[in-house]
Image (cartoon, helix red, strand yellow):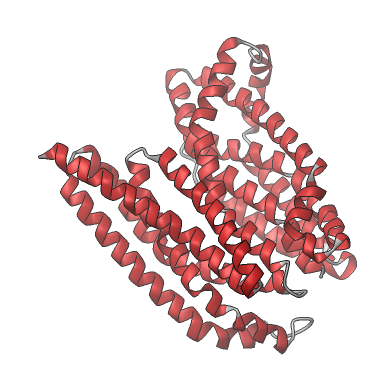
């Protein structure tokens, strides 16, 4: 029950952290670099101003999430009872306020990236993971599930202290003087115009975590943990298999579109989609047939019994089709991003979220939690894929017509 509560409590903070770290650099780094190239001092003052503004906004968001945490958690996990919701809320509170450190640390990462210092953030994450695991192992015999909360918060605080560029703290005074100038509001607005569409789209893509944990909470005790483990296994491995295709395709596709070589761009997109699909199907089949053998060996022990492992393995069929969607979705989204159709992609993903929740709710009424969970994930993944493919085909025809 305690591990179920922790996995539930970490859902919203983790999603918000993933969205912040995954989108802020894309929106902010080009603006920061532009300021730095114009004037180094001006760029540093701009950096500090945005740190202050966004940190205050994130603190306000954390306060709101804390105030309304009971209502939010009740909507997602109320089927498990009031005591479960209350305990989950007490665990989530500490993790929620650590998000302010995340926003500052992400700004620090952007600053280091702008200076070409790419290794420090990676080392900070590696060391933070080691600290997290060490704290859990050391403290869990004494404070139980709270050791995971301590590890979560300590990791974020450590990473913040490593990546934030202290040597530019002298610019705080200049930043505070220009804090309320009209130009500062304009700078903040420009950042939000670039950032908000990325936030909304990423939130829609990450909705699968909310859907999984909400519907798994309607199943017997332990299923939140089971579903979380199986989803991480499938999503993690298919992501590793297809990230190489995405990395190779994206910059090459940008170049082909900008040079108006649309026929070759279309060919490359088709090859990437086919390669991604083949690799995803292969790794999903590999997980389905091979992973149970290792799970029975590695996971059995302590409080996690052989029966727990067998329940875990029995969930595999429900994730086969969603995993294929997870593996290939970004390959269908990238062509639209290259064409500057982020807003269209955001609308598609929002529609996918609404439709997936509707289908899962209806399916739950007639077929129960596992079928509802699987059907919701399938609709969420493939609605986005089909929508992106339709838009790509329309835009491709326009480009080829212009070329002719």
Q: Depth check: give the residue in front, 156 or 257.
A: 257
Q: Position of residue 187 (x, y in %)?
A: 54, 20
Residue 137 shows in the view: no
Residue 128, located in which quarter of the rendered image? Answer: bottom right
Q: Depth check: give the residue in front, 106 or 128.
A: 106
311 lies above or below 69: below
75 lies above or below 230: above
175 lies above or below 250: above
Q: Position of residue 302 (x, y in %)?
A: 78, 83
- Residue at the image point whose x is 66% and y is 47% from the top: 159
User: Image quadrant for the C terminus?
Assistant: top left
Q: Position of residue 225 (x, y in %)?
A: 70, 70
Q: Depth check: give the residue in front, 40 or 70.
A: 70
- Residue at the image point whose x is 63% and y is 20% from the top: 171
Q: Is residue 52 left or right of residue 337?
A: right
Q: Is residue 84 left or right of residue 239?
A: right
User: Image quadrant for the N terminus?
Assistant: bottom right
């Amino acid at each position: 029950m305690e591990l179920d509560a922790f996995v539930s409590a970490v859902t919203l903070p983790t999603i918000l952290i993933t969205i912040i770290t995954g989108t802020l650099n894309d929106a902010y780094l080009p603006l920061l670099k532009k300021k730095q190239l114009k004037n180094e001092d001006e760029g540093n003052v701009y950096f500090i101003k945005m740190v202050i503004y966004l940190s205050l906004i994130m603190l306000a968001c954390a306060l709101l999430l804390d105030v309304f945490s009971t209502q939010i958690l009740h909507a997602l996990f109320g089927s498990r009872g009031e005591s479960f919701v209350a305990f989950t809320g007490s665990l989530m509170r500490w993790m929620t306020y650590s998000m302010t450190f995340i926003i500052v640390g992400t700004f620090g990462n952007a600053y280091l990236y702008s200076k070409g210092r790419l290794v420090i953030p990676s080392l900070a994450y590696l060391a933070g993971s080691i600290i997290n695991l060490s704290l859990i192992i050391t403290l869990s015999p004494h404070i139980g599930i709270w050791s995971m909360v301590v590890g979560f918060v300590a990791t974020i605080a450590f990473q913040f202290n490593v990546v934030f560029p202290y040597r530019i703290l002298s610019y705080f005074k200049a930043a505070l003087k220009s804090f309320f100038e009209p130009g500062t509001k304009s700078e903040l607005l420009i950042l939000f115009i670039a950032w908000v569409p990325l936030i909304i789209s990423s939130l829609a893509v990450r909705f699968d975590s909310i859907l999984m944990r909400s519907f798994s909470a309607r199943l017997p005790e332990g299923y939140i943990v089971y579903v979380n483990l199986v989803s991480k296994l499938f999503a993690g491995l298919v992501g590793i298999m297809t990230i190489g295709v995405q990395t190779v395709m994206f910059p090459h596709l940008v170049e082909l579109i900008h040079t108006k070589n649309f026929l070759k761009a279309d060919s490359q997109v088709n090859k990437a989609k086919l390669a991604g699909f083949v690799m995803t199907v292969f790794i999903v089949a590999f997980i389905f047939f091979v992973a149970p053998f290792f799970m029975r060996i590695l996971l059995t022990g302590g409080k996690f019994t052989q029966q727990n492992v067998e329940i875990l393995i029995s969930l595999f069929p429900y994730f086969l089709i969603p995993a294929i969607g997870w593996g290939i979705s970004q390959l269908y989204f990238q062509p639209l991003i290259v064409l500057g159709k982020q807003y269209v992609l955001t609308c598609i993903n929002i529609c996918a979220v609404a439709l997936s929740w509707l289908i899962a709710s209806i399916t739950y009424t007639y077929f129960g939690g596992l079928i509802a969970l699987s059907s919701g994930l399938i609709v969420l993944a493939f609605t986005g894929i089909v929508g992106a493919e339709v838009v790509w085909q329309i835009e491709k025809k326009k480009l080829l017509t212009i070329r002719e």
